[in-house]
Image (spheres, rainbow, N blue to C red):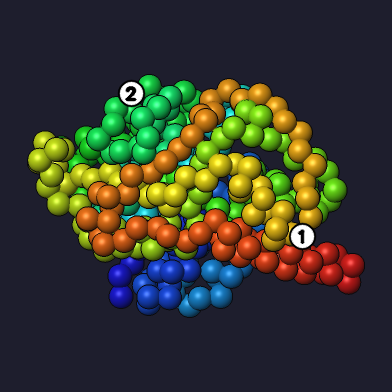
Amino acid sequence: MVTILVTGSAGFIGFHVCQRLLSQGNLVVGIDNLNDYYDVGLKESRLKLLMAHDNFRFRKLDVADRPDMADLFQQEAPTRVVHLAAQAGVRYSLQNPHAYVDSNLAGFVNILEGCRYGAVEHLVYASSSSVYGGNTKLPFSEQDSVDHPISLYAATKKANELMAHTYSHLFNVPTTGLRFFTVYGPWGRPDMALFLFTKAILEGRAIDVFNQGQMVRDFTFIDDIVEGVVRVLDKRAAPASQAGGAPYRVFNIGNNQPTPLMAYIEAIEKSLGRVAVKNYLPMQPGDVPATFADTDALNQWVGFKPSTSVELGVQRFVDWYQDYYSVAVRAHVAS
C-alpha cells in the first residue's frame, strides 16, 4: 500500500484525485485549510465523502505553516505527493496579493522541503495554463516562452515551476508540473464560469459575458484531469536533457479542443432547457482571449490525452448541480 499525500484534498480537483487514488487501494493523507475563498459547506461535503473511506486520513492544515508541514512529512512519511493546494483565481489576486504569496510561494517551498528531506519518490504539482500570459501563438506548447505573466496568480505558478526545477537539480527530487486548462465538472468551484452561469440561469438572472463573448477556452473535464494526474504520478520524472539533466517535467493537460465561450453557454442552455439572459461586458484585467493546449508531450509520456466533449461534460455538471442543491434544499426544509 502506497501512502500518497494530497494537498487541497477538499478542493475541486483534490477531491476527485483522492477518490481515484482511494479506489486504487492507496492510503491517502489529505490536507486542506478549508478557507472561505468560496463556500466552505461545499468543501465539507466533498470531505465527508472522502472520510467514508477507511484508507483516507485528513488533517486541517495550511501548507504555508512551516512547522506543521514539517511535522506532517515526518509523521506520515508519504511515498508520493500530489500538490493541489493553492490560492486560486486570477481576478482575486488583483485585490489579495498576499494570499497568493503565502499559499502559492511559501506553501510550495514547504512542500519542496518536505519532499527533499522525506525522500519522496515523486512530486506532482498543479501549474496552470495562465503561465502562457499574453502568448498569441496557438496551441500553447511547453516549448513556448512563459516569461510574461499578466496576473500575480500566473506569476506564482511560473515561480512554482522554477522552484521545482531548482529542487530537482540540486536535490534530485523528481517533480512534474501539470499546466491545467480550464477544468470543469461535478463538484466544481462556485467562482468558475460554469457554476456561475448555471446558478444564474436557474435563478432567472443575467449572466456576465466578458469580452463581448469573444473568448475561446480549452475546457477540460475533471475526469480527464484526474486520469492525467494519476498516470503522471505513476511515472516518475526521469533526468531530462532539456532540464539540464534534472528529474523534472512540465506538461500541458487540456482537451486540445478549444471551444468558443458562446458555444459553451449554448451547451449549458441546452442542458438546462433554458435560454440565458446575457450581459455583455469588456475583457477583465488579467484575462486572455484564448487558450488551447498542445498535449502531444503528455500523450507521448503517459499515452493519454483528454477527450471528453463539452456537451457531455456540461450535462454531467448540470445533473450533479441540480441533484446536489435539490438535496440541500430538501434538507433545509426538513430542518
Task: Please name the residue shown 10% across and 40% down the image.
Answer: 241
Foreground residue, 177 or 40?
Answer: 177
Whole-number angstrom distance, CA of label 2 to CA of label 1: 43 Å
In the rendered image, the vertical position of residue 130 relative to residue 122, given as above or below? above
Q: Is residue 194 visible?
A: yes
User: What residue lies at 77% left-to-right and 69% top-to-bottom?
Assistant: 327
Asked if residue 273 is positioned above or below residue 103 in the image, the reply reads: below
Residue indicated by mark 1: 273
Q: Kindly tell me whether residue 60 is visible in this rendering.
A: no
What's the residue at 72%, 36% (across, down)? 208
**Residue at the spot 53% in from the left edge and 25% down from the top edge:** 286
Residue 312's quadrant in the figure? bottom right
The picture quadrant where one finds residue 50 is bottom right
Q: Quadrant of the N terminus?
A: bottom left
Residue receiving disc 2? 147
Mark 2 or 1, nearer chain start: 2
Percent x, y for residue 293?
38, 43
Image mark for residue 46? none
Q: Quadrant of residue 28?
A: bottom left
Is 119 situated left or right of 326 in this image? Answer: left
Lateral position of residue 290 relative to residue 2, left or right = right
Q: Image quadrant for the C terminus?
A: bottom right
**Dot 1: within a 10 Å radius of its alpha carbon, few (fewer than 14), some, or many (20 or more) residues?**
few
Q: Amino acid at mark 2?
A: Asp
Q: Label 2: few (<14), some or many (≥20) within 10 Å?
A: few
Residue 150 position, x and y percent, is: 46, 23
Residue 97 image position (x, y, % from top left): 54, 25
